[in-house]
Structure formats: structure tokens, C-alpha cells
Amino acid sequence: MTEYWVSQGNKWCDFCKIYISNNPVSIRTHELGKRHKDNVAQRLTTMQEEGKAKEKEQKEAARALQQIEAKAKKSYQKDLASFQEASSSHTVETSQRTADSSKRSTTPDWEFDSSSGYYYNKLNGFHYDKNSDLYYSAALGKWVTLEEASKSGKVTKPDIGQASGATKGTGGAAPGLVVSKQLNPMRNTKGAPSSIAVNKRKREDVKPKKLSKEEEEALKAREAARKRVEEREKPLLGLYKFY
């Protein structure tokens, strides 16, 4: 029987980065050599250092995350305390205003005249109409505003909600001329069209600008760079939690 020689090939040593003969004697001789042992020891040392560095990095990231959460919690508590203080202050102020309003004495100068339906002040002889907010006196002979009425004497606006004898009027005749013109002539007419709405024009559709070949290549390069940055920063995204 004829025998044929078959090549066994070579074996790659990952520690030494070289090829050796693929037979038991050559492999054992290489593994017992000083060079191979030094490379194995160096690889183990490197792996240990990388493990320690990775563990240290994880601890620093966890510590940074705890600091961020502590600062956020402290800021939240501070804002909550400020809100509660402001709310409490507003409640106290509202209660004080309500108490002051309830304790406010009625205006003794103004009395409601049920026969005419107006309020009358015996001290200055003025009548007051709550519907038009105007004042009338026999000396003036016409209805005027509070500012004009104050020129002829000391006139104060009555407190309608607390004035003595305040009841629903009978709607008697006015003791003088009633002003029929608009109280606020500067007020705009209801329903007047806005000049902005009238002159508003619809924007015409603008056709997209045609990009040149250089601009398209620049946009593609920018998009590729953005994707590379996202891939590089993906391991850091898990360090932060959003609630």
C-alpha cells in the first residue's frame, strides 16, 4: 500500500502573533518558551487593568448619577416649599381681604331712595345712578361723572353692596337730564374687522431649491458624521434616567 505525505499546515499563536508548525512537539515547545509565557502574562495583566478601569468608570458614572439625582431632588423640594409658601401667603391674604371686606362699615352718607330708584346723599345733595355710574344735583341740573361732581363738593362713590337701605329700585323718573351718549366714546365698535385680518395674504407655495451635486455630497457626509457620533455616544445614554 502506498502512503502519501500530507501537509499539516501551520498554527497561529494569538499571544505571540506568529505561525508555528501544527504538530504536538512544535506547539508544546513554543508554549514552554519564555517568549510565549511573557506574552501570556502581559495579556493577563492588560485584561486585569482594563477590567479595573472599566469598573472604576462604572463607579464614577454611578456616583455622578447619584449627585444629579440628589441635586434634582433638592431643587424639587426647594421649589415645592416656595410654592407652598406662596400658596399659604395667598390664602392668608385672601382671607384677610375677605375679613376686611366683611368688617367694612356701610357708607352712612348715601341712602337708597325707593321712590326714585337712586341713592341720595343728604350732605351734598347728590343723587347716584348705579346703572350709568353718574351723579346728579339740583345745582348742576344734569348728570355728570364722579370727577365732575367732585369739583363742586366732596363726593365719594357709594358702596352699593353695603349702602344703607339698599333694595331693588322701583325705576322711578330721573330727577334730571339723563346722559344718553356713550360713556366711553373711545371704545371700538363691536364686530369691527381687523386691518390685519383684512390685509392678510396667503403665502404662496415655494418650490424647493434644487441642490447641486456638491451640496448633496456635503449633506450625505454630514448625515454620516452625525450617525457616527450617535453610535459612539450610545454607551453613555444608559447613564441617565428620565422620570
Image (spheres, rainbow, N blue to C red):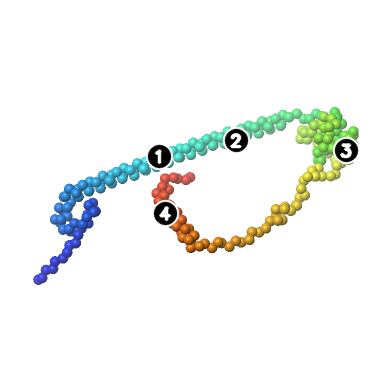
State how far apart marks 2 and 4 are (Cα). Answer: 50 Å
The label shown at residue 71 is none
Quarter of the image where one finds residue 173: top right
Would you say 18 lies left or right of 197 here?
left
Q: Earlier in the sequence, mark 3 or mark 1?
A: 1
At x 42% / y 45%, what residue is drawn?
239
Where residue 128 sits: x, y (%)? 83, 36
| Mark 3 residue type | Lys
Would you say 88 lies left or right of 165 here?
left
| Mark 2 residue type | Ser
Q: Nearer the viewer, mark 1 or mark 2?
A: 1
**Mark 3, residues whose alpha carbon is within 10 Å: few (<14), some, or many (≥20)?**
some
| Mark 1 residue type | Arg
Where residue 124 sits: x, y (%)? 85, 30
The label shown at residue 87 is 2
- Write down the residue under mark 1: 63
The label shown at residue 142 is 3
Q: Earlier in the sequence, mark 1 or mark 2?
A: 1
- Write down the residue under mark 4: 228
